[in-house]
């Protein structure tokens, strides 16, 4: 008799719990959210920025100054870091011995290497805001100063 009574109590508890769950979760009503709260929520969860393709980006210095930077400007702000000291095998500006074999490959090869990278030099010499034309002007400047 004790087993039957225990089962009855357990069954009664299970039914009571089931009824409580049905009573609590039966509705699918949504609370209305005021428009100003919705706007605040949308502002808080909005993305911090947008992804843009490189072809869609205009370099900030070129856009700010109204034109491309000169080879001299690029060299002194970006390339000098390696090309003044020969870091990682970079040919030193003004050293004709360093530059002769490179110049011998032709200007197009130098342009390609400056844009795509070569040996220890990363693509664009890490001047990611430099346009290809600015890099070519910088190569021209460096070659002119190193012959």
Image: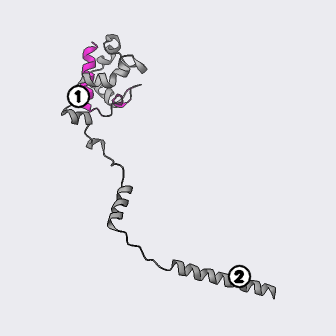
Q: Nearer the viewer, mark 1 or mark 2?
A: 2
Q: Which residue is mark 1?
A: 69
Numbered tag placed on residue 11 in the rendering: none
The reply to whether discs 1 and 2 touch (Cβ–Cβ < 8 Å) is: no
Snapshot quadrant of residue 115: top left
User: What is the chief secondary structure element of the magenta stretch?
Assistant: helix
Residue 68 x, y percent position in the rendering: 21, 30
Q: Residues within 10 Å of mark 1 (few under 14, many from 20)?
A: some
- Farthest residue in the bottom direction? 1
Is 123 part of what is drawn in magenta? yes
Q: Is residue 128 left or right of residue 31?
A: left
Residue placed furthest toward the right: 1
Residue at 79%, 84% (x, y): give it: 3
In the image, what residue occupies the spot 30% across and 41% down?
Answer: 54
Q: Is 83 situated above or below 43? A: above
Give the structural element (helix, strand or loop) at label 2: helix
Q: Mark number for residue 10?
A: 2
Instruction: Pick the residue in front: 13 or 79.
Output: 13
Expressed as whole percent of the image width and height from the top left, the position of residue 4 reads: 77, 87
Estimate the spatial distance between the alpha carbons at disc 1 and disc 2, rounded to whole Å.
83 Å
Please report the residue visible at 37 percent of the width from the left and 69 percent of the height from the top. Answer: 33
Q: State whether residue 142 is above or below residue 66.
A: above
Residue 17: x and y in percent read 62, 80
For the record, the magenta segment spans 118-147
Q: Is residue 8 left or right of residue 24?
A: right
Q: Residue at x 33, y 34 (%)?
A: 128
Residue closer to the observer: 140 or 11:
11
Under circle 1, the secondary element is loop
Residue 103 horizontal/vertical position (percent): 29, 17
């Amino acid at each position: 008799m004790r087993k039957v009574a225990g089962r009855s109590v357990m069954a009664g508890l299970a039914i009571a719990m089931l009824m409580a769950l049905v009573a609590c979760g039966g509705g699918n009503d949504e609370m209305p959210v005021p428009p100003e709260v919705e706007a605040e929520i949308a502002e808080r969860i909005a993305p911090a920025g947008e992804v843009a393709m490189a072809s869609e980006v205009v370099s900030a210095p070129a856009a700010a100054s109204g034109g491309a930077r000169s080879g001299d400007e690029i060299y002194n702000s970006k390339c000098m870091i390696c090309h003044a000291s020969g870091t990682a095998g970079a040919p030193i500006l003004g050293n004709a011995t360093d530059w002769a074999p490179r110049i011998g490959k032709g200007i197009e090869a130098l342009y390609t290497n400056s844009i795509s990278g070569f040996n220890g030099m990363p693509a664009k010499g890490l001047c990611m805001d430099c346009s290809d034309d600015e890099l070519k002007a910088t190569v021209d400047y460096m070659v002119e100063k190193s012959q």
